[in-house]
Image: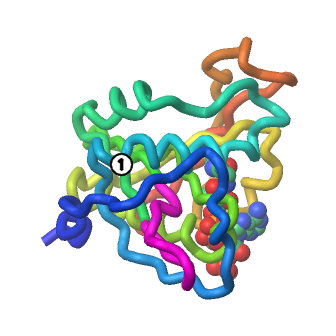
Amino acid sequence: MNPLRRYSIQKPSFILTTQTPDYLPTRALKVGNPRFATTDDIPHLVDVINRAYVAEAPFVHGPRTSGETVHERMLMPNTWFIVIEANATRGPRQIAGCVCLDCDGHRGHIGLLSVEPDFQGRGLGAKLLRAAESQCQMEMCCPEIELEVVSVRDDLFPFYAKMGYERVGTVPFPIESLLKQPAHLVVMRRSKGRL
Ligand SMILES: CC(C)(COP(=O)(O)OP(=O)(O)OC[C@H]1O[C@@H](n2cnc3c(N)ncnc32)[C@H](O)[C@@H]1OP(=O)(O)O)[C@@H](O)C(=O)NCCC(=O)NCCS
């Protein structure tokens, strides 16, 4: 049985706000297993994604996503949002990170990898990435998986290199008017055998 399936019916029982809650961060962090997101998760996904993508604010205008966009994407075939929940010692369980995966049977594609800023650097990003890769292999038998990184995000390339991704090309940034400075997307790929 696909291990992610066991978590697909869980529903979050808390509300995230656009502000980082007071109880974050604390030293101890209990991390749950990755599970599939449901439509009930959409507001929480939007919050986590937009808070994480503040890292891109120096280069790209506007919030990274909206509820409508996440909803549309969630309804697309062979597309999954995977979330991970965590609770700090003094706080309730919350969605601490997410990733979006889609597969066409030949190649998987990862997007919107996001970890709540106060939870970054604790292994959640790696766990989400590995969960998406497993899903890609188990459901679609894709031999490779790709993602794009904005070329000016120098901070991200060492992370993806560590996760086994290699630069394989470049493509134009999809909406040039959103850029605050010239940039393109760097395509990174992890291939079978390394997955
Ligand atoms: C990028 C992001 C998802 C990484 O998640 P994270 O939870 O902070 O990363 P992890 O703690 O899982 O890191 C996994 C490993 O990579 C290393 N790593 C993380 N960031 C790194 C960096 N910038 N440079 C080098 N290594 C890095 C960690 O040290 C860790 O190594 P270890 O296993 O030896 O300890 C997170 O920082 C984030 O949400 N950033 C903002 C949104 C974003 O930019 N998304 C990606 C857009 S393409």
Assess whether residue 94 is covered by the magenta stretch: yes
Can residue 12 be spotted in the picture?
yes
Q: Quadrant of the C terminus?
A: bottom left
Q: Which residue is mark 1?
A: 41
Q: Position of residue 56 (x, y in %)?
A: 75, 40
Assess whether residue 58 is covered by the magenta stretch: no
Q: Quadrant of the N terminus?
A: bottom left
Q: Is residue 164 above or below residue 110?
A: below
Ligand 1 lies in quarter? bottom right
Residue depicted at x 43% and y 27%: 69
Amino acid type, residue under disc 1 in the picture? Asp
Q: Is residue 27 above or below residue 157?
A: below
Query: In the figure, residue 106 lies in which quadrant?
Result: top left
Q: Is residue 153 above or below residue 21?
A: above
Query: In the figure, residue 14 lies in which quadrant?
Result: bottom left
Residue depicted at x 33% and y 60%: 12
Q: Position of residue 120 (x, y in %)?
A: 67, 67
Residue depicted at x 75% and y 46%: 55
Q: Which residues are magenta?
A: 85-98
